[in-house]
Amino acid sequence: MNAGALAPGPWLRLTAIAGSGACFLAVVSGAAGGLAPHRVLAALGIPLLATLAAAALSAHPPLRLPTLAALGLYGAAALAFGSSGLHLGLAALALAATLVATATTFRGAKPRPVGAWPWRDYLALTKPRIMSLLLLTGICGMLAGARGLPPIGTMTALVVGLALACGGASALNHVLDRDIDRLMGKRTANRPVAAGRVPASRALEFGLTLLAFSFVLLAGLANVLTAGLALLGGLFYVLVYTRWLKRSSPQNIVIGGAAGAVPPLVGWAAATGNLTLPALALFAIVFLWTPPHFWALALLLRREYAAAKIPMLPVVRGEHGTARQILLYSVALVALTVAPVAWDAFGLVYLVAALVLGGVFLYLAWQLYRNTIPRRAALLFHYSLLYLALLFTAIATDAVV
């Protein structure tokens, strides 16, 4: 990525400062002999240093040597944990390299202040409307896992951490899709990075910072499984779906949709510390919901996807072929939603909601299959959003009552 004349911005500086702080506390706790807090603090430093390294490799060459040195020394210190002297020495060197990297972020051309770009553009980078549905499924997954109301502190950590992960992944999506966004009409051409209101390097730093802080928050206040799942979902969305599948395969949304199915797992793991069969059922529901939901929208945007040369299903197989796939996935989705009741994962409240909501979903999919017109595609698309929100609300309600 070409960063132009821009020096590292405030988001990367914040990450660098946090990384230096984590390294310092890890060294101090290691020297003091506190094994448990030392390991926690050391683990929290890894995503911050990895974020610095990713930004350095992508957009800021002067940062590459100190950040890669810091990351390498940090890893070497972890490997030398059994030898106290060597371990502490390498950790001290890692801290020194991290401090050099942090200082480097303040050098070079004077960066354009963050206030020069409207805050609403940074908010737009996080895709709040999409995030709201992901947060809902994550919260409901947490309530289902806890079989009731979890501690308010844990729920707050989940909401904030998951929001940071979703927002960070969305910001990186803006960076990678900025070329095709300019080709898909006014709806996407006016996005902050595509329109040039936020430079790609700033959006990159912003996205990486949000992902790093999401991991630190969730690992520190929930558990490592929760943090790892949130990070995995974000990276899958960015690297597998956006970077690879979206531009190469008509099955892009089928496989890539796994990223959007991760938030219920994050919520469940935050509540329980593990993943069980009901949690995987929640994942599968969102996974099967994603293709009919997204293909209904793709039917409305078929010309835009064709102009950008994105092989979405309506572009490759046509409208009727897409409507047929929507119907098939809808049948599989509704059948799957009933299955958890068979092993007593969810109760009567959920079952009634699944049958009623699923019946409407199937009717709209059937109507679209019979006559593939924009009005019916739009109706199914908008209902699918309501469907998932109400279905997961029923899951949470069933767990709480």
Image (cartoon, rainbow, N blue to C red):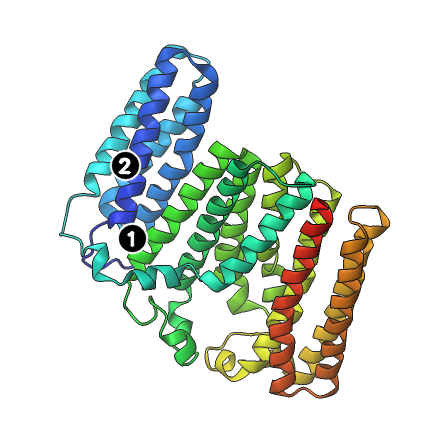
Label 2 close to label 1 by CB (< 8 Å): no
| Mark with earlier residue (2, 1) | 2
Residue type at the position of mark 2: Ile
Answer above or below: position of 350 versus 325.
Answer: above
Quickly name the residue at label 1.
Answer: 59
In the depicted view, which residue is nearer to us: 332 or 109? 332
Residue shown at the point (42%, 58%) measured from the top left? 126
Left or right: residue 18 versus residue 253 is left
Give residue 211's position: percent from left, percent from top.
43, 47
Quickly name the residue at label 2.
Answer: 17
Q: Is residue 250 visible?
A: no
Quadrant for residue 74, please give it: top left
Residue type at the position of mark 1: Ala
Mark pair 2, 1: CA separation: 19 Å
Residue shown at the point (75%, 86%) measured from the top left? 370
- Badge 1 density bin: few <14, some 14–19, many ≥20, Cα 10 Å: many
Answer above or below: position of 223 versus 64.
Answer: above
Answer above or below: position of 182 versus 303.
Answer: above
Residue shown at the point (70%, 82%) measured from the top left? 368
Label 2: element kind: helix
